[in-house]
Amino acid sequence: MTNTKTPLSELEMRGNFVHRHIGSNDRQIQETLNELGLQSLEDIIPTAFPDNIVDQDPLMLVDAISERAAIVYLRKIRARNKTFTSLIGMGYYDTVMPAVIKRNVLENPSWYTAYTPYQAEVSQGRLEALINFQQLIIDLTAMDIANASLLDEATAAAEAMNMSRRLSKSDSNNYFVDKHCHPQTIAVLQTHAKPLDLKIVLGDPLEDFAQQQCFGILVQYPDTFGEIKDFHQLGKLAHEKSALLTIATDLLSLVLLKAPAEFDADIVIGNAQRFGVPMGYGGPHAAFFACKDSHKRSMPGRIIGVSRDSHGNIAYRMSLQTREQHIRREKATSNICTAQVLLAVLSGFYAVYHGEYGLKMIAQRVHRYSQILAQGIEQLGYQVINTSYFDTIIIQTPYKAHRIAARAEEAKINLRIIDNNTLGISLDQSSSRKLIRQLWKIFALPGKKLPDLIEIDKNIDECIPDSLLRTDSILQHPVFHLYHSETEMMRYMRLLAAKDIALDRSMIPLGSCTMKLNSATSLQAISQYEFNSLHPFIPTYQAQGYQQLFEELENMLCDLTGFAAFSLQPNAGSQGEYSGLLVIQKYHQSRGESQRNICLIPESAHGTNPASAALAGYTIVNIPCDKQGNISLEQLKEIVTEHSSSLAAIMITYPSTHGVFEESFCQICQIIHQHGGQVYLDGANFNALVGVTRPGKIGADVAHLNLHKTFSIPHGGGGPGVGPIGVGEHLIEYLPVHPVVSGVNPAANGETSIGTISAAPWGSANILSIPWAYIAMMGAAGLKKSTLTAILNANYIAMKLAPHYPILYKGKNGWIAHECIIDCSTFKKTSGITVNDIAKRLIDYGYHAPTVSFPVHETLMIEPTESENKPELDKFCAALISIRKEIAAIENGVADKQDNLLINAPHTQLSLIADEWPHPYSKQQAFFPDNSQYENKYWPPVGRIDETYGDRHLKCTCL
Ligand SMILES: *Cc1c(COP(=O)(O)O)cnc(C)c1O
């Protein structure tokens, strides 16, 4: 095809990522435009967007760089990170991710491109992986029930505090916190306590607690200084005060230690990071949350449970979905939506691969090394302060601790500096004899003879008291015994992956979720050692590559949004909302207007909005929407006038969750500002605006972005996420800070800042190279093209489907934004078919359903994104149109009302091979409804899952 006459610029274009990311080629885009009556993509702007939001200022962003150039650039950046051995501990430890898991899960799109398992029938693989994770947590903590991850240990502690408040009958508002919890945990608790008028009381649980009145207590076991305290009396003591006992713990230590449940804990939390997930300069990792059975209905986060399918066989699903925020809104148990699913899956597999024996070997080795290290250090003339410990020792130094730490740094080892005379060392799975000898050398004064490791080992006495040693067995379920050879492990992971629909099979049209391409190039950096091996609390001179990455990403985001600054700390959209609302609160307080406590939230808002506002202590006033799904300006004006002096903020999603660009956005912002309020923009749908408008320039004061939607971080089956917030100039000083690492927000200080939102200073730092690479490779023009193509695709789908399904909402010129809501509510009357039946029938066609019944009941919300090409859109529309015909057949009596293609969907292999085929329709219609299934048939592993059975018989462990 190429000949020597092809212009050089075109030859170079082949390195251009934009045409890899955008699904349709230019010819297909042109065809789509023609069908919609437009000449060019640019025509979409005046057609679909309100005139007053379009931004004419060009982006500062440089032109797109090629995939190769992005890799080279990131290589240079990562070369600026120093890969020291970090023995800082404090909740982060080096670990070894088994290569078989790295290759088959972390780097496998079947796992990382999946979404939250809303459609359980096409998610059985990851649901099983998550139930393994829950079983692991239940086994090690010995609690009754565990969820399928939270965002990090510190926010898990905050969730525990809130849950304790909900459940405790105590009328005290004090929450007692072990002063030996990790400092970042205490900081996040303080942030969460304040807006709810709860008081954090720091103290020693064994000395100060007895006199305290409180609704709950949090202790750490082993504590941040490694000490293992006996909490046998604590549960009883807490319960006498009507307080709930929460224990923060370390999973690996629990392999050897008595389970926290034996202290009668109500809740147990922690971080599963050291189960095979690299530190990654702070995250992402899966936090865990376990509790007593009696508290389960108040538990935050998603719980995977067991139910049965239409054949009466076992099937997994997300339990207690009625507690989801979008149903309970401000009464939700938590604002958690995106969690850390992929990380929970990784940690679960780590336990499956090692099993009880393997984990014991790892834990015992870490513990033995720690004891040997401690004895040697004592022989060298130092005092080791803690008496019982698992992996962390605290050393008193007669002279400046900094001097020893500096010597360690010269040997590329980071120690924890506690104060002028105290150092901490935490060992981990990667520690070795060599490391111990190196450490002795660092501590030894000149001329001092080094201890003899073998001799010390011979004379080691256990330092953990018998009463705190674990005696029961763990991980007895078969799944933890079956897959210890690499061959078996590889096949198990493949078996599970094959059960699911992820983006590597077909388009996932989930509205509001933005299932665009997660390019292989953008993902490369995350598994590189120079990015993923860093401890979050190292001195920043060792993380210059990361610091550069943050600065460049923040600048890119400021450029795209028109905001003055960004905080990368929030670990999901929900956390961005919460942080942004606290920023607004702090702003009002600093101006002497702390009476401003009303937050307006439109009916159409995502459920996390009211849940976050409630957590931030706001009084929520709902704003009704009109028939077109828009905020009713008249009613807004009335409400705002009524609450003028107490108006704090409005939370507005733009484009709205109804998938339209409201014409009155700028006007709404003006009204709110006139009354002294601030505008919070839920920017989860920013992918419909990038390159066309800048929220910070058209009236928003704060916004969060979902980097896991708009900027291409994979969803991982329900996490990780990154939900940074951007703010205007006047709000910079309130952005989050960190108690351990300074320099997170140079403009803020302890006084002005809202405090700490996440355990790690820059949140999920390890995955920030993904949005960086995405933005760099798309460039200004590519990002805009991407936005316009996404809108084009959504409108194309709307046009194709309109003759068959009513399109619920439309904006200017009958155009919608990036997603399309089709109304399925009438079928119930005409044929008995529900929107759920349509969702399940799509599985027979090989598709994951769109978003079901959100934000409007009995509708499907379809978001195609720019990454799907025209043939795939056509194929998907053809499936929905064909299903509409199947409904019509019921409507006009051709098909049976009780026994039809829809209510029996999805159709499984089991029904295919059954001796009898009892249905009035053919197998061909059931299994191969159109030609496309012949070469690529997805077989659902289970039939329709009984949702209510699963909730009534809640069971959340392996079978
Ligand atoms: C996805 C989404 C959120 C929540 O983001 P998470 O990262 O899941 O917490 C909030 N608002 C809207 C409109 C969303 O689509």
Image (spheres, helix red, strand yellow):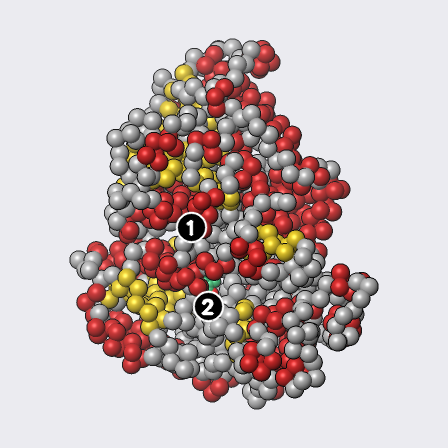
Which quarter of the image is occupied by the C terminus?
Answer: top right
Q: How many callouts does the rendering have?
A: 2
**Residue holding disc 1:** 298
Q: Is residue 599 left or right of residue 439?
A: left
Determine whether, in the image, residue 727 is placed left or right of residue 586. Answer: right
Q: Amino acid at mark 2?
A: Phe
Q: Of 717 and 723, which appears nearest the observer?
A: 717
Q: Residues within 10 Å of mark 1 (few under 14, many from 20)?
A: some
Residue at point 47%, 82% (across, down): 810
Residue depicted at x 59% and y 25%: 365
Q: Position of residue 467 (x, y in %)?
A: 48, 21
The quarter of the picture where residue 488 lies is: top right
Residue of label 2:
686
The CA span between labels 2 and 1 is 33 Å
Helix, strand or loop at label 2? It is: helix
x, y percent for residue 69: 60, 58
Secondary structure beneath dot 1 equals helix
From the top left corner, tell me how far across and down residue 765 is, in percent.
48, 49
Q: Residue 883 appears in which quarter of the rendering?
A: bottom right
